[in-house]
Amino acid sequence: MTPGYHGKYLRIDLSTLFIDFPPIPIGVISDCIGGVGLGAWILTRETISGYDPLGNQAALIFALSPLVGTPLTTSAKFAVIAKSPLTNRICDAMCSSHFAIAAKKLGVDAICITGKSDKPCILFMDSLGQDNVSIRLVSADSYWGQSASETESSIRSDQGTEWQILSIGKAGEMQIPFATLSHDGRHAGRGGLGAVMGSKNIKAIAVRGDKRTIISDPEATIRIAKSLSQRSFSPATAKYRELGTVANLLVFNRFESLPTRNFQEGSFQEAQELVKYDLAPARKITRNSCAACTIGCEHIYALDSKSGAAQKGVRMEYESLFALGPLCGVSNSHQVLEASSLCDFYGLDTISTGGTIAFLMECASRNLIQDDTLIRIKPEFGHGDTVIQLIHEMMSDMPGIYGELLRLGSRGASRQIEQGSIAFAQQVKGMEMPGYHPRKLHAMALGMAVGCRGADHNRTGAYEIDFRDHSPDASAIASSVIETEDKAAIMDSLILCKFIRGVFTDFYEEAADMLCAVTGLAHSRESLIASAKWIVNLRKSFNQREGWLPSEDCLPSSIFVNSEDHENGLTQDRLEAMILHYNLGRGWSSEGFIVLDPNVIEQLIITENSF
Amino acid sequence: MPLIPDFGIIILCGGESRRMGFPKALLPFGSQTMLEFLVHKSLTIASEIVVVLSPGQKLPPLPPKVQLIEDQVAYQGPLTGMQSGLSLISKVCKTAFITATDSPLIMTELIEFLYSRMDANDIVMPFDGKYHYPLTSIYRVQPVLNQINTLLSENRHRPFFLLESLQSNIISTTELRAVDPNLGSFRNINTPMDYREILRIANLPVPFNFQATKINMEFYGVPRLRTGVHSFVVEAETVDELIRELSRLFPQLIHHVICNHSLHPAYKLMRGTTEFLTDPSTILNPDDQILLLSVDAGG
Ligand code: SF4
C-alpha cells in the first residue's frame, strides 16, 4: 500500500444499497494526488455524458488527500465534487475540519455516492473495529427542515459524539442549485453541491473509523510540519489571523474593484460603514480555526440582539460581506450580518444568493419585472431588510413572492425575465461572480471567464496578478493566469488551505517534499507542475464531455466598456485576446478545445464508459 | 571651557553631498551655516582648527584663525582628507580630533572624554558593536599621519586599516552615553530627512527649501489595525525615507510590517492603485497618495 493512501474508494449506490471498493491505480494516485484531482478522476469514470446533476445517475464525491491526518498545518480538508446543478459543469468545493480526518479513518481515499434513497435519510458509514466500511441508512424525518448545524448537533447527541457529520440545510433539501453542504460551520459553498446531496434524499452523512495510513518518513514529515507551523505565524498570514478576509473590503473599494449594486459600479461610498467589521475587535466574539490549523482565520461577529436569527454570532468572510452588502447597495452592517447568518441557517451560498438578489434589484430598477402577481416587496438597492426578506422568500413556495424566480439563480431568472436581462446576470456558466470587479482586474476577468466551474476566485487565484506588479500584455497575463490556476490545482489536491500560500518561497519544491515525506512517491517540482496541468485538463475534459462550448468562456456583456474607454475598463476584444493566449498557452485549440490526440484521450479518461 | 593644550580639530567638509543634493557645509543651521556652527563650537575646546575642503569648494566666511587646506583630489574618501588635515596641523599640535561637517550635534564633552582616554595610544575610536567611527575619533598626529601615508601608497583607502598597526583604544558607545546620553554626536547627515531630523533635535526651524515632500499615506489591513490610523500626511523624499519615517512614527509596525528597515515581503507600497514602489530610491512627489497594504490582496 502506498503510504498516505488506502488505495481504494468507497462506492455506494443508494438505490440498491450496493457498496464496493474500486482500487485507485498507482498512476492515478501519483498524477491526481487527492482532493480535486482525485475527485475529478472519479467523477469522470463514474458518470456518463449528459447526465442530470440531480438525477439518479449523478455522482457525489468526497475526496480526501494523503496529507489529511498528518501534523501538517491546514491539511484537515476534503473536496466535494459533482456536476453542478447551477452550471451543468464540473464543480468542486473545499470543506474542512474533523470530518476530513474521520472520513479518512474509514479506510478509503474517497467516497462516491450514486443513486437515490427513496426516503430522506442519514447515511452512516462506519469502520470502527471492522475490517471494512459498513453503511446504514436511518430515517431523517426528525431532522428534515433543520439547519446544517442543528442537524449536526442533533445527530451527535442522538448517536454519540464520536460521529463526524456533514449536513445540508433546508436549501439542500429543496435542491436549490446554489445550496451548500456544511460541517462544523464550514461550507462547501459554491455550485449547489448541497442540492446534489438533497437530490439523493440524504440529509446528512455521519462517519467514524479507526483505519490509519502509514507515513513513509515520519521524521521528515514532522520536520516539515514544524517548519510550516512556525511560518504560519509569520507576517505572511497576519491578515488572516488578525482580520480575516473582510480586510479585503476597503482595499478593493480603494482599487475601484468592489462590485457594487450588481457590478454597476466598482466602489461603494458607504464602505466605511461596513469598516467596523474590518477593524472593530469589540464586535468580534471570538476567533476559530479548522481542525489541525495554526492560522485560525475565522472571525466570528456578534449579531444584533434584535435580530431574529437563532445564532448569537456569525462567521463573516469578505465574499459574504460584499455579496450581501455593497453588491445589493446595503451599508447597514447589522443587516448584512443577519443576511449572512440566514444564508448559513438555510444552507445557501452567500455569493449566489447576493448575486441573484442584486440581479433582481437591477431588473426592478430597469422596470423589467412586470409580473403583477409579484406583490410583496419592491426589490430596491440599499435596503438590507429587503435582502433579508428575499432570502426568506427564496425558501418559500407562497404565491406572489419572488421565491421561485430567485431559486433559479441569476442566469435562470434572466431566462424567465428575458428582455435582455441576461446582460445584467453577473455570472459565468451560471455561477454568480465573486467579489472582484473584472472591469479593472483583467487577470481576474480572464480567470473567471475560463474557470471550469464558472465565475470563480478559488480555482484560479488570478487576482494575485492584478494586485502585483505585472505586464499589461495579454499574453503575459494569460501565462500568469495559467500559473495561478496550476498552483491552485495542486493546493486543492494536496489539500492545503490557500491562506498559507504566502509562507512558501518555492511552493512546488516544498509541496513535493511534503508529498515525498508522507507517501514515499518520487514527487518533484517538475512532476507536480505536470500533475497540475493534468488536473486542469481532466476538469476541462469533463466539461467538454458535458457539452462545453467556447461561447461559455465569457463575461456578462454589461461588464465591458466600449473601445474608446479601454483605459478605464475591459473591452470584449481584450478579454477575447487574453482567452486566445490562455487557450494556446494551455496547449488547447485556439477556441479552447482539448486537442483530441488519442493518447491524451486515453490518459484523460474522457471517453464515456471507459471503465 | 578651557582649551585642551596642543590639541586641534580637523573638520572634513569635502564630501560629495550627493544624496543631500546641497553642499553640507552651507546648510543653514539656525542663524549660521552648518560649518560655521561646528567651527565655533570647536573653538571652545581647541586652539587650532583646520578645515579640509575639496578643490574649488565654496565655504561660508570663517574666523581668521581657521586654517583651510584643499584636498589634492576631490572625493577620494576620508583618508586623503585626514592626510591633508593632519599634515597641516602637525606643525602645531600633537593630537587632533577629526570630525566631519555634517555632525553638528557633536558634544565637546564627548571630545574631552575621548581625549581623556588617550593614555599611550595613537587612536581613541568609538565602536557601537557593529561600526567604528573614525570621523569621531582622536588621533596622535605624527604616527597616524605616517601610517596614512603608508596606507595611501599601498592604495588602501579605508580609515579602519589604521587600527591594524597603531595602538588603539576602542571605546564602546554604551560607555559614551555617560557624556552623550542620546549619542547625538554620532548622527550625521546624508539625506534631507537626516537634516530635518537633526534640526528637530536641535530645536531649529527647517528652511523653506528643505521642507519635506508631504505625501498622503493610507494604511490598509494589518498596518491599519496595529496603528489605528487610516490616512495621514507624512514627510519623505524617497521610498526608503518613507519606510524609515513610518518606523519612527509607528514602532508597533517593526518586526510585523517593517523588518530590517525595509518592508516585509508580505506587504507592499503603491503610488495610487497602479504603480508598485519596489525601489527604495524612488523619489516621491508632493501630494502622492501612497498605499501600504498586504501583498496578499485577495482571499
Ligand atoms: S486558515 Fe482558516 S480556512 Fe484555512 S484551515 Fe485555517 S481556519 Fe481553516
Image (cartoon, coloured by chain):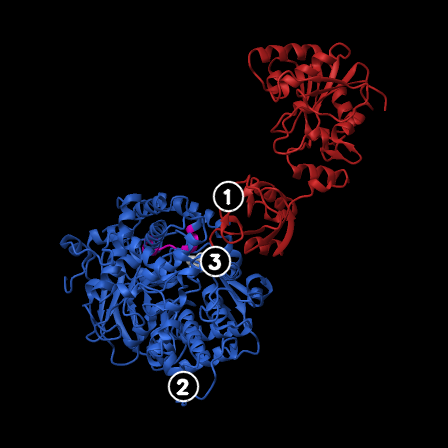
Chain colours: A blue, B red
- The residue singled out by tag 3 in the image is A296
**Picture layout, residue B192 above or below residue A348:** above
In the picture, the disc for residue A370 is: 2
Check the residue under mark 2 and report the chain it is in: A
Q: Nearer the viewer, mark 1 or mark 3?
A: 1
Where in the figure is residue A197, as x and y percent of width and height? 30, 73
Segment colored magenta: A490-501
Of B189 and A149, which appears nearest the observer?
A: B189
Q: Nearer the viewer, mark 2 or mark 3?
A: 2
* Res. A268 in view: yes
Q: Amino acid at mark 1?
A: Thr
Tell me how many marks there are: 3
Q: Amino acid at mark 3?
A: Gly
Residue A150 occupies quadrant: bottom left
Of B109 and A323, which appears nearest the observer?
A: A323
Where in the figure is residue A575, as x and y percent of width and height? 35, 59
Ligand 1 lies in which image quarter? bottom left
Give the structural element (helix, strand or loop) at label 1.
loop
Label 1 in the same subunit as label 3: no
Principal secondary structure, stretch drawn in magenta? helix
Q: Residue at x 24, y 80 (%)?
A: A118
In the picture, the disc for residue B278 is: 1
Q: Give the left or right position of residue A207, taking residue A313 as reference.
A: left
Q: Residue at x 22, y 54 (%)?
A: A28
Count neighbours of disc 1 (C-alpha within 10 A) and say few if under 14, some if 14 to 19, many if 20 or more: some
Whole-number angstrom distance, CA of label 2 to CA of label 3: 47 Å
